[in-house]
Image (cartoon, rainbow, N blue to C red):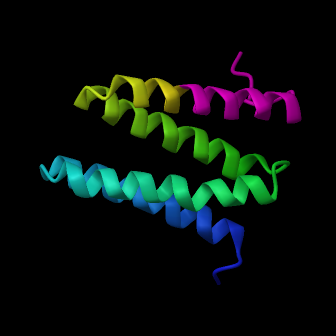
Amino acid sequence: HPDNREYAVHYAEGLTQLASALEALDRPDEGFVCRRTAIRVCEPLVRSRPDRSGARSALAAFRSALANVLARRGANEEAVALFAEATNDLRELIELEPNFPPRYE
């Protein structure tokens, strides 16, 4: 169902997996589109419910993955901006949930 946030996050996760497969098949432009789409799917979820950690955590991971792709392409300014957004997402998660991420001791 399109209103189900969990389905939307799973869809976005599937897009990032598809992106990886496309990149492995030497189809980086298609993978790039999938990664951008995953971010676009998650951004409104985070805006509508900033207190939910699942979508925000996924968004941070998707932004970091795309930033890595951009850095490999030489788009360093855009990569740095995305890394900064991902870092901000994680900082906000820590503020909302002091036990995020789980402690591995």
User: Relative to 14, does residue 39 appear above or below in the rendering?
Assistant: above
In the image, what residue occupies the spot 62% across and 71% down?
7
The quarter of the rendered structure image containing the N terminus is bottom right
Magenta span contains residue 9: no
In the image, what residue occupies the spot 79% across and 60% down?
48
| Most distant residue in the top direction | 105
Measured from the top left, where is residue 64 in percent x and y?
48, 34
Q: Is residue 77 visible?
A: yes
Measured from the top left, where is residue 38 in percent x and y?
49, 57
Is 20 on the left-hand or right-hand side of 40?
left
Is 94 on the left-hand or right-hand side of 29?
right
| Most distant residue in the bottom direction | 1
**Magenta span covers which residues?**
84-105
The quarter of the rendered structure image containing the C terminus is top right
In the image, what residue occupies the spot 50% across and 44% down?
62
Closest to the observer, 93 or 73 = 73
Measured from the top left, where is residue 86 in percent x and y?
59, 32
* Quarter of the image where one finds residue 100: top right
User: Relative to 56, does residue 74 appear above or below in the rendering?
Assistant: above
Magenta span contains residue 91: yes
Q: Is residue 97 visible?
A: no
Is 5 on the left-hand or right-hand side of 63?
right
Closest to the observer, 10 or 30 = 30
* Quarter of the image where one finds residue 70: top left
Measured from the top left, where is residue 8 in percent x and y?
60, 68
